[in-house]
Amino acid sequence: MRELFEYTLKKIPFKFERVFYNVEDLYYHIGFDNNGKVEIFRMKKDEEGMWKIQAQVLPLWIHEMELELNDVIRVNETSI
């Protein structure tokens, strides 16, 4: 798996960074360009194993892409 990588969804490049806050708390910081302003948000795995956007004010279209972002992270987590 990669600690840092970029992946494009719907023609938007997203930068993913794998971050541990402590031994057990794995998050992904995800950044994207929103009309010239870099926005960064976090995703964390929930009890059911899905990567979810952490509470934050973001454009609605980002929340609508949560499942696709989850899939990108899952592929990274299972790659060698």
Image (tube, rainbow, N blue to C red):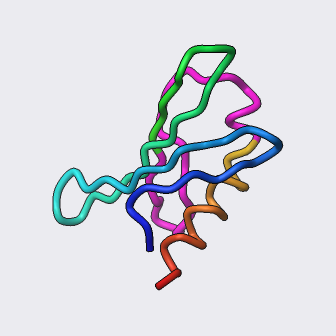
Image location of residue 42, percent across then percent down: 45, 41
Residue lying at the far bottom of the rendered structure: 80
The residue sitting at the left extreme is 22
Looking at the image, which residue is at 67% across and 47% down? 66
Residue 53 falls within the magenta-colored stretch: yes
Q: Residue lying at the far top in this picture: please name it.
A: 36
Query: In the rendered image, which quarter is residue 22 located in?
Result: bottom left
Q: From the top left corner, tell me how far across and down residue 11 is, in percent.
A: 81, 41
51 vs 20, nearest the viewer: 20
Q: Nearer the viewer, residue 33 or 22?
A: 33
When the figure is inspected, residue 75 is found, relative to residue 43, above or below; the finding is below
The magenta stretch spans residue 75: no
Q: Which quadrant is the N terminus positioned in?
A: bottom left
Classify 76 as above or below 33.
below
- For the record, the magenta segment spans 43-64
Query: Residue at left 69%, top 34%?
Result: 62
Q: Is residue 17 above or below residue 3?
A: above
